[in-house]
Image (cartoon, helix red, strand yellow):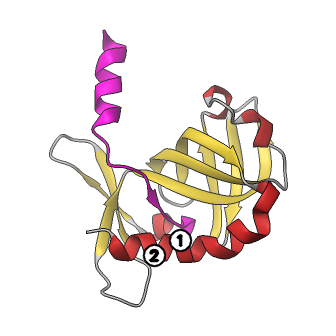
């Protein structure tokens, strides 16, 4: 029965927001009225410098180091490193876990400072078109953050 309550809690989370590791590192942790942790980050872009509250994020970067015995992978995006845990239980996650691969990760934020840590929900290999994905990523992040309420 406990599994069902955890599943219900996961379903109440907002959809993932595209972010950079620096935004999480510079963010502030806060508690929702239900006691769940969320993180307040500054929006990217030239517009209003308002903030966003996030708990589930979408990040992209290059795999630096894989530690299957620790169930983690270290990834580098344009603004710094972030750690992803739970890699051994993510469907389709293992094939993309080689140093040098460009990957996307959707996950729940576990901590934000000194280095962001996510618990992986989904991972995918974007290496086939890595140059395009890497080049456009910052614009995708900024565009999404500017249109979110």
Q: Seen in the image, is 69 located left or right of residue 56?
A: right
The C terminus is located in which quarter?
A: bottom left
Tell me how far mark 2 sits from mark 1, CA to CA.
Answer: 5 Å
Residue at disc 1, secondary structure: helix
Q: Quadrant of residue 144?
A: bottom left
Toward the bottom, the furthest residue is 46
Q: Seen in the image, is 123 located left or right of residue 97?
A: left
Find residue 72 and report its horizontal and vertical position in percent.
Answer: 68, 39
The residue tagged 1 is: 140
The N terminus is located in which quarter?
A: top left
Query: How many dots with numbers?
Result: 2
Q: Is residue 49 magenta?
A: no
Q: Residue at x 60, y 39 (%)?
A: 85
Find residue 98 and report its horizontal and vertical position in percent.
Answer: 83, 45
Residue at disc 2, secondary structure: helix
Give the numbered dot on residue 103: none
Nearest to the observer: residue 64 or residue 105: 105
Find residue 137 and report its horizontal and vertical position in percent.
Answer: 61, 70
Q: Residue at x 47, y 50 (%)?
A: 111
* Label 1 environment density (alpha carbons within 10 Å; few <14, some 14–19, many ≥20): some
The residue tagged 2 is: 143
**Stretch of the chain drawn in magenta:** 1-22
Toward the top, the furthest residue is 1
Q: Quadrant of residue 114?
A: bottom right
Q: Seen in the image, is 42 located left or right of residue 84?
A: left
């Amino acid at each position: 029965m406990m599994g069902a309550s955890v599943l219900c809690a996961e379903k109440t989370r907002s959809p993932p927001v595209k972010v950079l590791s620096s935004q999480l590192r510079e963010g502030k942790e806060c508690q929702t009225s239900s006691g769940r942790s969320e993180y307040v980050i500054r929006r990217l872009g030239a517009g209003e410098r308002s903030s966003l509250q996030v708990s589930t994020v979408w990040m992209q970067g290059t795999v630096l180091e894989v530690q299957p015995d620790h169930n983690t992978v270290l990834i580098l995006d344009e603004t710094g490193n972030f750690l992803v845990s739970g890699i051994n239980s993510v469907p389709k996650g293992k094939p993309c876990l080689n140093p040098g691969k460009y990957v996307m990760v959707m996950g729940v934020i576990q901590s934000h400072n000194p280095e962001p840590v996510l618990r992986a929900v989904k991972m995918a290999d974007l290496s086939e078109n890595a140059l395009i994905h890497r080049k456009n990523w910052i614009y995708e992040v900024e565009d999404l953050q500017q249109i979110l309420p």
